[in-house]
Image (cartoon, helix red, strand yellow):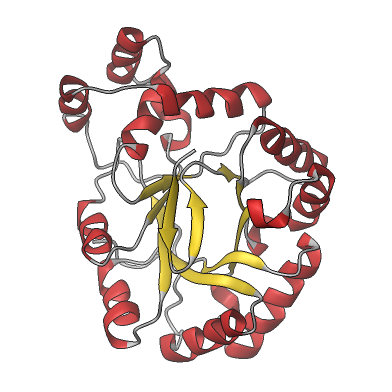
Amino acid sequence: MDYLHTQGIEMPRLGLGTFRMQGDVCRAAVESALGLGYRHIDTAEMYGNEEAIGPAIAASGIARKDLHVTTKVWHENLAPDAIRKAFDTSLNKLKLDHVDLYLVHWPSKNMNLPTVFEALMKLKQEGRTRAIGVANFNVALLKTVVEEIKAPIACNQIEYHVLLDQTKVASYLAAKSIPLVAYCPLAQGRAASNETLAAIGRKHDASAAQVALKWLLDQDGVAAIPKASRAESQQANLGALNVKLDDEDRKAIAALPKDQRFVNPGFAPAWD
């Protein structure tokens, strides 16, 4: 497994996303993934599954230093006191003494970014999170955080896949040496049935989904966190690491429509 080195942490480039997984299903999925070799687990207070993930981590017997755990604060909790309360709750549910990465899950229209990052930096200084970062931030917001506030963000987690162009955000992050963590990397399942990807897969004895995942992981500074509850899917995603795409494959993928955004709630920022 390759790692991204960012703000003092090592983040495995392939992780397990857990959105919409709950209870016993979530616990079993995390236990399965850790058993298969995953070392990067992504959750959030909003997912309502931290209580299931905590026992799965504990049962794995894996040394804490060998695991990367990300969680996130919801956009309604971005006042300093609310951030601390949300963080304490997340840590308690995960049954951990620290997380590796704590993210602002979504920007909020009325957030005060300097005070948000002051609160996040305190958590980092206390050693309760090893790094801080953001999710769903556009370039304008990133510029405020990185250039004005000078916050040491370890990543921006955004929707990114073969059907969505993220050149503007990706270029800005690359210029600042900030990793991009791709969620929905399989376009909410649509990559699996894409005929262009399937044709490339046949050439390499791989699935369309594996091709889509490897396309992301071949990019410098990009990690991906596909959601997979079944062990077979988790294993298949790990198998994507062995696919070798060539220039012809990349050209075919570049020609796919790139305007399909599947996560766009009413509170989302103005996308670039």
Horizontal and vertical percent position of residue 223:
42, 47
On the image, which quarter does residue 26 sit in?
top right
Query: From what the image shows, is residue 151 above or below residue 169?
Result: below
Horizontal and vertical percent position of residue 260:
31, 41
> How many numbered marks have been drawn onto this rendered protein structure?
0
Query: Is the C terminus in the top left, top right, bottom left or bottom right quadrant?
Result: bottom left
Query: Does the image show residue 267?
Result: no
Query: From what the image shows, is residue 54 above or below residue 186?
Result: below
Query: From what the image shows, is residue 133 above or below residue 61?
Result: below
On the image, which quarter does residue 265 sit in?
bottom left
Horizontal and vertical percent position of residue 105:
52, 66
186 left or right of 229 in image? left
Horizontal and vertical percent position of residue 252:
18, 23
72 left or right of 208 in image? right
Give the residue at x 31% y 37%.
218
Query: From what the image shows, is residue 205 above or below residue 162?
Result: above
Give the residue at x 36% y 68%.
269
Q: Nearer the viewer, residue 19 or 268?
A: 19
On the image, which quarter does residue 268 sit in?
bottom left
Query: Does the image show residue 45?
Result: yes
Q: Nearer the viewer, residue 265 or 69?
A: 69
Q: Nearer the viewer, residue 250 or 270?
A: 250
203 left or right of 66 in image? left
244 left or right of 130 in image? left
Q: Nearer the viewer, residue 234 or 141?
A: 234
